[in-house]
Amino acid sequence: MTRQRSLFLRRPVLELLVAAAMLCVWHVANQSTAIGQDLLGDEILPAGFSLELRPYVDFPTNRKDVIAMTLRQGAPRLYAVVQEGYVYQLDPNPDGTATATEFFNFTQSLAAAGRAMDGSADQKGLQSLAFHPEFNQEGSPGYGKLYTSYLEVRPFSGTGFNYLGSSQRGTGVTADGVLSEWTYDFDSGQVDSNSFRELFRVRMPRYDHPIKQAKFNPYAQPGDEDYGLLYLTHGDSNIKNSPNDDPTRLDNALGKMLRINPLQDGDAPYSIPATNPFADSTDADVLQEIYAYGFRNPHTYSFNVDPSGETHLIVGDIGRNNVEEINLVVPGGDYGWTAREGTVVHLQLPDSDPDAGYISGTAPLPANEADFGYIFPAAQYDHDANVSQVSSGNSIATGHVVNNGSDPDLAGQLIFGDLSRRTVNNMFATDFSQLLAAVTQLDSDDPARDEPSELTQAPIRSLALALDHDGDSQTPPQLFDDLLDLLNATNSTNRTDVRFHEGPHGELYISSKVNGTIYLVTNSVALAGDFDGDGAVQGSDFLAWQRDAFLKSLNSIADADRNDLVDSADLAVWASDFGLQWGPAPSLTGAVPENASAWTLAVAIAWGLRPFSRRAPGAT
């Protein structure tokens, strides 16, 4: 008998959400535009569905600035990074919440290495932590290795440190952005404070847009070109218009995405991947670490795989006064800052000029734009703000593409938001396939895309929120137009300070530094036995399990318990969930067996497969 999964948000509530969102859009559209601008002429309409939230874990007031969350291979739990200098392991509870247990006292360990973290708020402090993909593989070069990016009080002497590039330290800047390596001691169950190893550091002209997130490609498998390579973004470290044009210069790390092999290479602290776009450069003024450039503040990014199996890197880049960007990263690509902001020319007037900023600070793209070679956003939205303001405060924060067979409304959607002072519509979605289809590069030799008017972007839609505030599915959720409204129900704030995080099964988490709460998006939670991601646990999922059965496989969708091994324990999850589904039941060939029958059949088949799976080539 097919069991229908009951969705948390029922149709009457959905209709109410859609009506409320449409009313909000009508209200905004009918306000006077005399004091503002609509540079792109874009209109963000309601998506017609919501994110369903439930509080997952709370952090204490003095450690509430969750800046990032990360996963470790072979461990089905999340790790939360707080800016104040701590990393917490999140252990799931039976009631669907989690308990935060301190995993790494970064501040204390850094002090033991004779260093000091610079600040713990704004854009200072600990920024990210990344586990090497070989972290759990004893005997491998990456065994027990983890990496941190952070702001560190600069040393009294600049000698003896590996400064990356030629950027200059600005007046009053007393910190460096640093990337470092640590080693976890599996015997003691702690990070070894004596294992600190610095890879490099970056000088900053201004105290803004510093070092950002370090990540490994979660889809890369052993043997892949990208396996074990660490990505890192760094902002332009300039509050306004980057007068030195650092982001487009190849001799520094400012406004860049970097990629390295972080493992020590002889006497060198790390190595340059041979496939980096500038790896073969013999120019001393070109950093071989650069993977892409021309960014302003690329502080959030994620990876996603398209239907053909190709991995794409999606970056959210915070604009200055005019446009927020979602970019698809091309190796060696120039994303245009400071000459371009979104699909407009950014006129670099000095800060003292009374016309600096919105309208007089931009111009349309020229007819010969194709000659410059910039890469433009796959999606963007503008700052509908008062032209007299220095900045409207809009700041994009991107999440990941939900692609795990959960709520069909979320399928293939990149979820993102605005972390600063955007007061109307600050939670969004855009379709990943439409991002891939966007025309983001011009070519003077291609008549189909040699003019600025031929650039295209994926449409953006706004999302409402439904909060399960009491953990009782029998009471209606609290409905909010966006995250700022939700936060102001219990706090007083003009910012969301939102971050988005991906869980071990592709589910979405949302956190805010305003209240120190991590929320689970419950309609992004997949059925555990849905191994082919079609929203139903059925016979086809057994075939998906069979493909990887009894093989060690990183990030296999059939690895239900996330221990990097597809085995009978994962098959037991499939049998337990057999018949569950999201939405209408798909057509099945043959009768649907009861759980016990499915399990008996699966074990029999699996037992028959097991010797074959482990048989050595040529064995009889």
Image (spheres, helix red, strand yellow):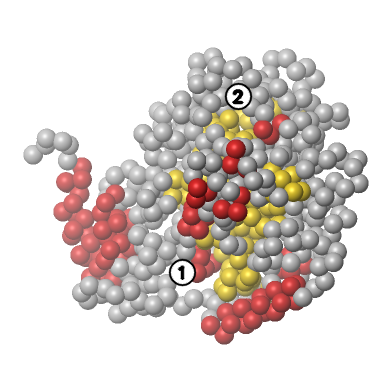
On the picture, is 278 further left or further right than 61?
A: left
Figure quadrant of residue 382: bottom right
x and y, in percent, of residue 221 in the image = 39, 39
Q: Which residue is mark 2?
A: 287
| Residue that mark 1 sits on | 408
Residue at x-position 78% and y-position 58%:
421
Residue 348 coordinates in the image, percent (x, y): 79, 40
- Label 2: which secondary element: loop
SS for callout 1: helix
Q: Nearer the viewer, residue 264 or 550?
A: 264
Estimate the x, y position of residue 306 in percent, counting from the top left: 42, 52
Dividing the picture into quarters, in which one does residue 575 lie? bottom left
> Foreground mark, 2 or 1?
2
Seen in the picture, residue 83 relative to 521 is either above or below; the reply is above
Evaluate whether residue 313 shows in this view: yes
596 sits left or right of 183 in the view: left
Give the quadrant of residue 233. top right
- In the visual, does 376 lie left or right of 222? right
Inspect the image, locate mark 1, and give the three-letter code of the amino acid beneath it: Pro
